[in-house]
Amino acid sequence: MVIVFLIIIIFILSLSLSGVVTDDRSRRPKLSSYTLYYLSVYLTVLIGFALLYLILTLNGITVIKDLESSNYFTMLTDSLYVSGVTLFAVGYGDFVPIGIGKLIAIIEAFTGYMIPTSFVIKVVREEAHRSFY
């Protein structure tokens, strides 16, 4: 029963995501240039803030509680996780920013809110321009 439920959920999610990766008129698979551009922007911001958290931590400035570890790979993956959770405004609470990390997290969360806003504004402007002419 659980397997059937998971298959239904995956099917519904794939239908909802199909609008992002297909052309509405022909339903052909196609990643739009907007999609690729904004995915690359998200990835760049996520990695940039993760490296900022990691570099500050390696230099002895604690920005995220419980981020320090003896293993570099663990610190890197935790930094990427913290950055992703902050950028997408989920904030699970397993890592908590402290000190200057609070300001950095606020800037990253604000950036995470502004990226989709700029995406919507750009698409609406393009559609309005296309329908006007």
Image (tube, grey):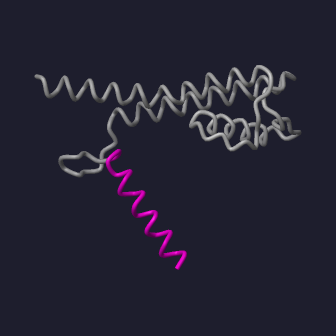
Locate residue 115 relative to residue 22 in the image: left or right.
Answer: right
Q: Quadrant of the C terminus?
A: top left
Residue 67 x/y as whole percent: 81, 36
- The residue nearer to you, when weighing 27 against 13, is 13
Locate residue 36 relative to residue 1 in the image: left or right.
Answer: left
Residue 33 x/y as whole percent: 34, 33
Above or below 29: residue 86? above
Q: Is residue 108 magenta?
A: no
Residue 78 x/y as whole percent: 74, 40
- The secondary structure that dominates the magenta segment is helix
Residue appearing at x 66%, y 40% in the figure: 91
The residue lying furthest to the bottom in this view is 1
Residue appearing at x 76%, y 39% in the figure: 95
Residue appearing at x 67%, y 37% in the figure: 80
The residue lying furthest to the left in this view is 133
Residue appearing at x 70%, y 24% in the figure: 52
**Residue 14 in which image quadrant:** bottom left
Locate residue 66 relative to residue 26 in the image: left or right.
Answer: right
Q: Is residue 12 magenta?
A: yes
**Residue 56 in which image quadrant:** top right
Locate residue 53 relative to residue 108 in the image: left or right.
Answer: right
Above or below 57: residue 14? below
Residue 23 x/y as whole percent: 25, 45
Q: Which residues are magenta?
A: 1-21
- The residue nearer to you, when weighing 108 against 36, is 108
Above or below 100: residue 14? below
Number of numbered discs visible in the structure rendering: 0
